[in-house]
Amino acid sequence: MTRVRPTWPDLPAHVRDAVVAELGGPVTGWTSHDGGYSPGWALTLESAGGSAFVKVASTEYDVAARLHRREAVRAAALPDGVPAPAFRWIIELPEPGGAEPAWVVIASDVVRGRVPRTEPWDLDDLDRLQHLARRIALHEVPDGGAFPDFADHTWPEAAQLADERPAGLATYDPWLAANLDRIAEITAPERQAEAFAGPHLVHADLRADNALIVRRADAAEEAVAVDWPHAMRGAPFLDLTGMLPVVQATGGPAPEQVLERTPLPDGVDPEAVTVWVAVMTAYFARTSLEDPPPGIPHVRAFQRIQAEACIPWLRDRLRER
């Protein structure tokens, strides 16, 4: 499920020229960063004017281009002190002789760090990711600003599964199909709105592949979050728990074991967390059964392994009620 990305020489010449102009000098070295789940370029560029991390998407892949535009707005608005690279600039370019944008390029500071160790999972790195989620949630962001309210988005997948009963459900644990009506009730829109509301900054896509481990001046290591197109405003537990299905799906501890190591913030309502687990279960299960979007053929398998991790987590949480 790992993407092999195109490289700096693969970019059209006019796009390279525009990036060089922004950097303030010719590119003297580059590194392409494979991985991720969206098409396009992810490059660390070295130049006489300094270094930058640059992402490029063709508007042929509308989703990727829209995510870059969205990240430009939200990353630029992050509060001071958020553990994230500083955003620099965005440019949009047409093809030569064209009028409409054909390329979207965004740049941020380079984070000099290593990827979290996940093969196998390093529990210290997992703790660093959880502490990163808590540090992000310490920041509050204003209502009506660059960050939409998480609570304003309703996740309809549980109700859709309960109504549609797609044939692909038979490929999952039978418990899911047998409990769809109950899951749809738990995830009713009004319950989602209550569970997810809050003023806290939410990365909303925090995983090992969206974080780097850096060494501080005192030699201790900590995690920094990258890739901010989905950032929102909401409850303080959303990032902490949202990463746990993929942790278990890739060989790490089960969600409740992680939460024993790094508990949720004081005052978090367990019922709100259960609503979130139910939402994730239905979301990953239903989307895993859809056709893949253009340019991202491997995302459905990624969603499936998370659904398979969510189902026993949700079953156990409902058993405790």
Image (spheres, grey):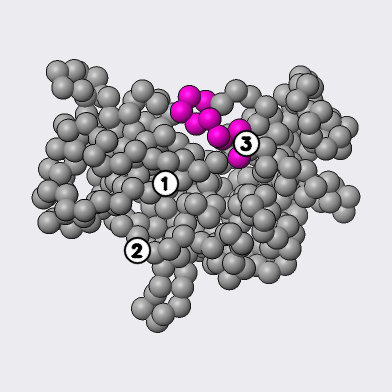
Task: Tell me residue 216's x, y (percent).
Answer: 39, 75
SS category of the residue bearing label 1 = loop
Q: Amino acid at mark 3?
A: Ala
* Crowding near the residue tagged with mark 3, few <14, some 14–19, many ≥20 C-alpha atoms within 10 Å: some
Horizontal side of residue 288 vs 86, given as left or right: right
Q: Nearer the viewer, residue 62 or 42?
A: 42
Between marks 3 and 2 in the image, the one whose residue lies nearer the viewer: 3
Task: Tell me residue 317's x, y (percent).
Answer: 81, 51
* Crowding near the residue tagged with mark 1, few <14, some 14–19, many ≥20 C-alpha atoms within 10 Å: some
Residue 22, placed above or below residue 214 = above
Range of magenta residues: 293-302
Tell me how far mark 3 sits from mark 1, CA to CA: 18 Å
Contact, mark 1 vs mark 2 (Cβ under 8 Å): no
> From this viewpoint, is residue 45 visible?
yes
Q: Mark 3 or 2 closer to N-term?
A: 2
Q: Amino acid at mark 1?
A: Asp
Q: Mark 3 or 1 closer to N-term?
A: 1
Task: Tell me residue 44's x, y (percent).
Answer: 29, 52
Our reading of the magenta stretch's main secondary structure is: loop
Q: Mark 1 or 2 closer to N-term?
A: 1
Residue 84, placed above or below residue 11 = below
Q: Which residue is mark 3?
A: 301
* Crowding near the residue tagged with mark 2, few <14, some 14–19, many ≥20 C-alpha atoms within 10 Å: few
Asked whether 297 falls inside the magenta stretch, the response is yes
Q: Nearer the viewer, residue 319 or 311?
A: 311
Q: Amino acid at mark 2?
A: Arg
Q: Which residue is mark 2?
A: 112
